Image: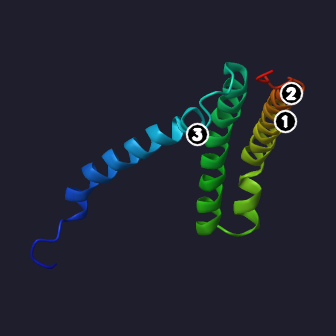
Amino acid sequence: MAAGAATLAEQQPAVRDGYRAWKAREDRCLELYFPDLPANVLAAARDAQKSYDPLISNLKDQWTYLGHDLNPSGIASLKPDADKLNQSATVLFKKIDDGMKTANDYITSLRSQKPATDD
């Protein structure tokens, strides 16, 4: 290893802190970029996000497993987990649809408001 190069163990705390800071900003993106969104629109988006993160994590776990055991018995062993993932995905898609409806209703309400005039 080159002189002055940090080992992986030495880098991990900085990487972890950087990830936490990035995640905190990501969690606030809607509020930062769209500060005037009503609470119900933000809540709908957050509700979908809470279902999205675990679903993607579980999918990644299955991909990793199949990367090590890609054969008919490995695929068959994931059937119960796949059924649960399908149920989770159905719930997530419903939450996304509900969130989109909430956002579209908000946009429609903006269109129906008459702008203020100086007259």
Number of numbered discs: 3
Is 42 placed left or right of 103 in the picture? left
Which is more foreground, mark 1 or mark 2? Answer: 2
Q: Position of residue 66 (x, y in %)?
A: 65, 64
Residue at label 2?
105
Kind of residue indicated by mark 1: Asp
The percent coordinates of residue 19 (x first, y second) are: 39, 48
Pointers 2 and 3 in contact (CB under 8 A)? no
At label 1, counting other C-alpha atoms closer than 10 Å, the crowd grade (few under 14, some 14-19, many 20 or more) is: some
Q: Where residue 109 sits: x, y (%)?
A: 85, 24
Rendered view: 118 above or below 27: above
Q: Residue at x 60, y 36 (%)?
A: 30
Label 2: which secondary element: helix
Nearer mark to the viewer, of 3 and 1: 3
Disc 1 to disc 2, C-alpha distance: 12 Å
Q: Quadrant of the C terminus?
A: top right
Pointer 3 residue: 33
When the figure is inspected, residue 70 is found, relative to residue 24, above or below; the finding is below
- Using the numbered discs, state the Cα–Cα distance from disc 3 to disc 1 in whole angstroms: 21 Å
Q: Position of residue 101 (x, y in %)?
A: 86, 31
Q: Secondary structure at mark 3?
A: helix
